[in-house]
């Protein structure tokens, strides 16, 4: 049995997090998305995988290697130009030598149960083709499938007006090699891409019966927007058991499932409420509060008096002291100055909105903080308002409140003008008059700007 994974796309809607990595390599619960997908199938008996790579392929290949570190065998196929999912699948034709195979999109998070349902369907030799479906929120975001008596009757990619009784395409398929003939005859979609849904329509037209595999909504997440990563992180953390391999000082308190990897130091006065993941060589504390559904990467420094809640913090980032991060994602090698705060709740209590590809989208989340790219630095007392995105490499000077998105590689400073004026003698509460040489000493106006 072989599982082929399509992981060639960039993930534009996840920028700035995909500026230096493909979306499939974004970490949740300490592991890239694609690792979780492979692990779900591995635990259901699959040992052979082929990954279609493209955008920043070296990031995925350098992590997965040949699969030996994951207990599987992995090889790669390169899609040189992003032309859509059907074109990505077409690259597999010369690599797949089995009569049937499983095909998955690489940007989904699935449970062991979801993978088990697909594998079980594959084991039924009478199944020529199958497609996993799910009743999802925001159905219009997906390719939609109509099902009758357990078989697919029709499929259309992201229609403007989805039928009320339709299922979302869950991005997992079982195919015979005949799918490659359908792919070759697939024409461009209205979006200008060669899409796998078009190839499936060709199979239906040829009379091939496609079985539907129903996946429960709680067993599947399509990771297409930044807040989907937070949901996937939460679900993945819920599957983990406590494991303490680092050093926990006296006076630190760990409650619930907490994974502390080798080389980690948890300093005195720190309170961690799981599920929480802390990666290798990271240091947390003293006097920190790490709340549930937080994933901290490798070699991260969380200093005195910080609070982090429901966040993904990537490798080599520094959060030295007195900062609050809530419902946010922080990229690699960021350096957040003292007092950096992420607002995660609107004053009016409405759900937070975020710009995705120049369109304002309702996240549906009452609490959502900032999405911060790699290599971002903030000065002291910086505030990031709910739903803002900060591009990679941007530097934000001290005392700034950020209300809108910032592009990558910018330097933002606010210069203040000090105005010092003469203060007339006044009386203090005790009634004693201030003299000329007292606290109210006259000073001349100095209007020069301060850096």
Image (tube, grey):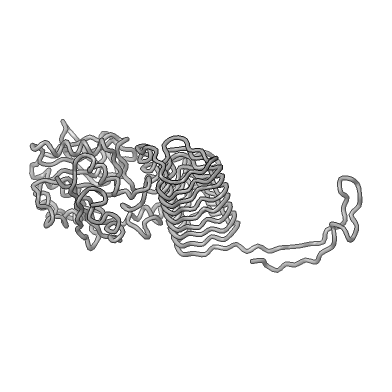
Q: Nearer the viewer, residue 8 or 265?
A: 265
Q: Nearer the viewer, residue 146 or 217?
A: 217
Q: Residue at x 12, y 53 (%)?
A: 96
**For residue 163, what is the image quadrant?**
top left
In the rendered structure, the answer to whether residue 265 lies left or right of residue 379 reads left
In the rendered structure, the answer to whether residue 440 lies left or right of residue 107 reads right
Please state, as top left, top right, bottom left or bottom right, where the C terminus lies in the image: bottom right
Q: Is residue 8 above or below residue 448?
A: above
Q: Residue at x 53, y 41 (%)?
A: 250
List the single residue furthest toward the top: 149
Q: Residue at x 36, y 53 (%)?
A: 13
In the rendered structure, the answer to whether residue 450 lies left or right of residue 157 reads right
Q: Position of residue 64 (x, y in %)?
A: 27, 54
Q: Nearer the viewer, residue 83 or 439?
A: 439
Q: Position of residue 31 (x, y in %)?
A: 34, 48
Q: Position of residue 230 (x, y in %)?
A: 40, 44
């Amino acid at each position: 049995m072989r599982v082929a994974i399509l992981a060639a796309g960039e993930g534009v809607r996840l920028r700035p997090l995909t500026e230096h990595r493909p979306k499939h390599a974004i970490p949740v619960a300490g592991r890239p998305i694609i690792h979780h997908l492979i692990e779900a199938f591995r635990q259901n008996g699959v040992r052979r995988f082929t990954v279609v790579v493209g955008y920043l392929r070296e990031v995925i290949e350098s992590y997965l290697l040949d699969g030996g570190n994951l207990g599987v065998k992995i090889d790669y196929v390169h899609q040189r130009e992003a032309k859509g999912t059907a074109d990505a699948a077409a690259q597999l034709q010369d690599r797949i030598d089995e009569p049937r195979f499983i095909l998955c999109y690489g940007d989904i998070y699935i449970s062991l149960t979801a993978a088990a349902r697909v594998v079980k369907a594959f084991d039924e030799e009478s199944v020529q083709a199958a497609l996993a479906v799910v009743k999802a929120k925001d159905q219009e975001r997906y390719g939609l499938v109509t099902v009758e008596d357990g078989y697919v009757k029709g499929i259309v990619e992201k229609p403007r007006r989805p039928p009320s009784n339709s299922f979302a395409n869950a991005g997992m398929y079982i195919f015979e090699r005949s799918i490659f003939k359908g792919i070759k005859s697939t024409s461009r979609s209205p979006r200008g891409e060669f899409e796998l849904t078009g190839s499936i329509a060709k199979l239906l037209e040829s009379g091939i019966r496609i079985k539907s595999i129903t996946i429960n909504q709680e067993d599947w997440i399509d990771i297409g927007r930044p807040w989907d990563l937070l949901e996937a992180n939460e679900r993945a953390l819920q599957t983990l058991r406590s494991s303490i391999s680092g050093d926990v000082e006296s006076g630190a308190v760990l409650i619930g499932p907490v994974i502390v990897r080798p080389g980690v130091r948890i300093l005195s006065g720190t309170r961690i409420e799981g599920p929480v993941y802390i990666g290798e060589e990271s240091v947390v504390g003293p006097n920190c509060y790490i709340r549930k559904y937080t994933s901290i990467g490798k070699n991260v420094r969380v200093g005195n008096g910080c609070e982090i809640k429901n966040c993904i913090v990537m490798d080599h980032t520094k959060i030295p002291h007195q900062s609050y991060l809530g419902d946010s994602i922080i990229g690699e090698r960021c350096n957040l100055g003292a007092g950096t705060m992420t607002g995660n709740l609107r004053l009016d209590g409405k759900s937070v909105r975020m710009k995705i590809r120049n369109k304002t989208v309702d996240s549906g989340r009452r609490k959502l903080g900032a999405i911060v790219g790699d290599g971002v630095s903030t000065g002291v007392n910086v505030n990031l308002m709910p739903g803002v995105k900060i591009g990679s490499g941007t530097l934000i000077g001290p005392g700034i409140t950020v209300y809108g998105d910032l592009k990558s590689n910018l330097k933002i400073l606010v210069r203040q003008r000090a105005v010092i004026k003469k203060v007339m003698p006044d009386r203090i509460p005790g009634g004693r008059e201030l003299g000329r040489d007292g606290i109210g000493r006259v000073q001349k106006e100095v209007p020069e700007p301060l850096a």
